[in-house]
Amino acid sequence: MRTPRDSFALNDDGTSQVGATPRDVKMRELAVRNQLKQGLASLPKPKDVEWELELPEEQQEVVKTDDELREDASRRDRRDRETREALEALHQHFCVGLAGIQNRKIGDGPEGLIAAEAAKLIANDATRFPQPGGKVKGSAPPLDVIGDSDLAAARQAIAAETAEIPGLEQVQQHFESRSSSSLLLGLGCYDDDEERHQETVMRAAFDTVQDSIIASADRGTKLETKLKLHLGGYLKRQALLREKMNGAHEALEKANNALHGFKTLAISEEVAIARRLEALREEVGFVSRREREAQEMYRRTKDELDTLRGDGANGVH
């Protein structure tokens, strides 16, 4: 039974109380909603932005009868059993025995060939695309690679075998329409068969060509993607080499300018050296001449002095 303290959410554990009716649950939800409204109303209003809380309108309570609330036990048990079986089926582990599929005895007729090929396909699918939680025993045999021409021939044979057989009324109408033709009786049907066969062949050829075009387009797309990757690498390499070449060219230009400058300086130095040597030679000649003149003057002066000293000693004036 509910108590007055239940309004304080003391027993709020996510389960319904004993003896609680849908009306009590609805009343409790209304009480919680009103309590939430009061709590939100007591909050201070925001300063910058004014928020408006829109609550859904309260719907009128739908009072259900006891017959609607009462559920058949057998129906509930059946629903629970179906749910349990579905869950068990979801968690069931599948095991595919490839050896058992391959070793099964099958006849040598067309049905046997079809069954053997189907077994190979099932084994390969089970190996390549395993089911979550499944097991595969043994190894799948390799599938044969079928060429485009064989596929086209198989499609043509299937189209010829599965062609719709006309009924008796259609045959009669066709025969009556051909009877009034200028062609001989019974010869007009051969043209239709030939046209139908030609149409089948053309459709098969068209399908083959279309498949080949699609395959070529896929290969072209893959090749284009690969070439784009290579082209991107080549472009990066080109940019790097271009940058290095520009740097080397600038360095070469600077070296050439420096070389020309040094050559000009060397020529200027050679001319200046020759001019300085000539000036030095002239200066040396001038100094040598002045030295000879000074020595000659010194010699005459000394001779004159010696003469004067000799005359004074002999008493001759």
Image (spheres, rainbow, N blue to C red):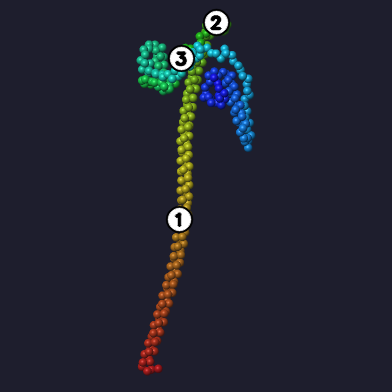
Mark 3, secondary structure of its residue: helix
User: Which quadrant would residue 131 be assigned to in this image?
Assistant: top left
C-alpha distance separating marks 1 and 3: 86 Å
| Amino acid tagged 1 | Leu
Tag 3 residue:
157
Choose between 225 and 25: the one closer to the eye: 25
N-term-proximal mark, 1 vs 3: 3
For label 2, the crowd category at 10 Å Cα-Cα, with few meaning under 14, some 14 to 19 and many 20 or more, is few
Mark 1, secondary structure of its residue: helix
Q: Residue at x 46, y 43 (%)?
A: 240
Tag of residue 144: none
How many numbered dots are placed on residues in this image? 3
Asked if residue 189 lies left or right of residue 118, the reply is right
Query: Do the numbered discs 1 and 3 sit on residues whose CB atoms are within 8 Å?
Result: no
Q: Residue at x 44, y 71 (%)?
A: 282
In the rendered image, is residue 179 in sight? no
Q: Residue at x 37, y 94 (%)?
A: 315
C-alpha distance separating marks 2 and 1: 106 Å
C-alpha distance separating marks 3 and 2: 27 Å
| Amino acid tagged 3 | Ala
N-term-proximal mark, 2 vs 1: 2
Choose between 210 and 145: the one closer to the eye: 145
For label 3, the crowd category at 10 Å Cα-Cα, with few meaning under 14, some 14 to 19 and many 20 or more, is some
Tag 2 residue:
169
Give how far across and how far down residue 163 sits, in percent.
50, 12
Tag of residue 259: 1
In the rendered image, is residue 95 in sight? yes
Mark 2, secondary structure of its residue: helix
User: Which quadrant would residue 98 be assigned to in this image?
Assistant: top left
